[in-house]
Image: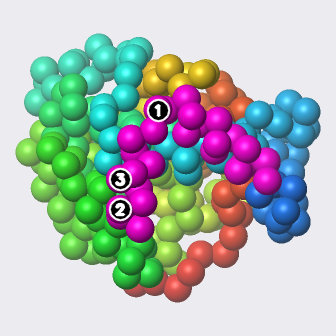
Amino acid sequence: MITLFRVLALLPLPLLHAVGAALGWMTFAASGSYRRRFLENARQAGYTLGQVRSAVGETGKLLAELPRLWFGRPVRLEWTGTELITAAQAEGRGIVFLTPHLGCFEVTAQGFAKSFGPITVLYRPARKPWLRALVDGARSRHNLATAPTTLAGVRQMLRVLRDGGAVGLLPDQVPPEGLGLWAAFFGREAYTMTLSTRLAQQTGAAILLAWGERLPWGRGYRMHLRPWPGSIAQDAAGAAAEVNAQMERLIRECPHQYLWGYARYKRPRHGPA
């Protein structure tokens, strides 16, 4: 599989995106369960298929671009809002980047690592050994470290933030049972991680909202940064609701690149409290 990914990484990004878009529509047509979840999640947020139909192809692009991002030449990146990063670094504060399943979330950490310094990203290890070896090897690169969704991983991220470093999370990912709270997401209760805001509260780190826009015709990506508005709610339930509200705000900026097929409203799997 690694050999296949390395071969695919040689292909130009526009071609990978074209193939990915076709695969996205093929999956949408072939899988009734995926299609229903896509439409239900979009409808829950107030969108019709006509309004977010391009998200079908964008989901395919998300998968097709991985070989290039993991094993290929660097892609073209643009930035907006970099003054938020430099301001936090000038104050010696750590940074917690919150990124929804929007656009290309793989490239956001890579872009920061290349332009601003080390970053540690929270990830859930793959269950299948062959996939775990592929992902771990692909994400092992200069200035980019990973922390597993375990107590040891949380401690690792706390150390990074206390040293003034940066960490990244996908807060709209469903955490294991005991590591989140139920909070409204587009008007429906979704199990929401509490880790993101706790990290900031315990370390004094700045929270920045980030997402990577996939530019048309394979021209690269544009990194968007937004500040966290105001202070964080002190209670866990209030903080979880605020996180979901901010993720909704980012998604509404570009709903046609959101991963509507993600099972955001599923029950959490059993895990350590």
Q: CA distance from mark 1 to mark 2?
A: 17 Å
Q: Are marks 3 and 2 in contact (CB under 8 Å)?
A: yes
Residue type at the position of mark 1 = Pro
Query: For the magenta stretch, what is the residue range?
Result: 1-26
Q: Pinpoint residue 132: horizontal percent, then vertical percent.
A: 36, 73
Secondary structure of residue under mark 2: helix
- Which residue is pictured at 57% across the width and 34% down the height? 15
Would you say 58 lies left or right of 85 here?
right
- Which residue is pictured at 89% across the width and 39% down the height? 49
Q: Earlier in the sequence, mark 1 or mark 3?
A: 3
Q: Is residue 180 above or below residue 235?
A: below
Q: Quadrant of the C terminus?
A: bottom left
- Which residue is pictured at 63% across the width and 44% down the height? 20
Whether residue 75 is visible to the viewer of this picture, yes or no, is yes
Q: Within 10 angstroms of label 1, few (less than 14), some, or many (20 or more) residues?
A: some
- Which residue is pictured at 47% across the width and 32% down the height? 12
Residue type at the position of mark 2 = Thr
Q: Which residue is mark 1?
A: 12
Label ID, residue 129: none
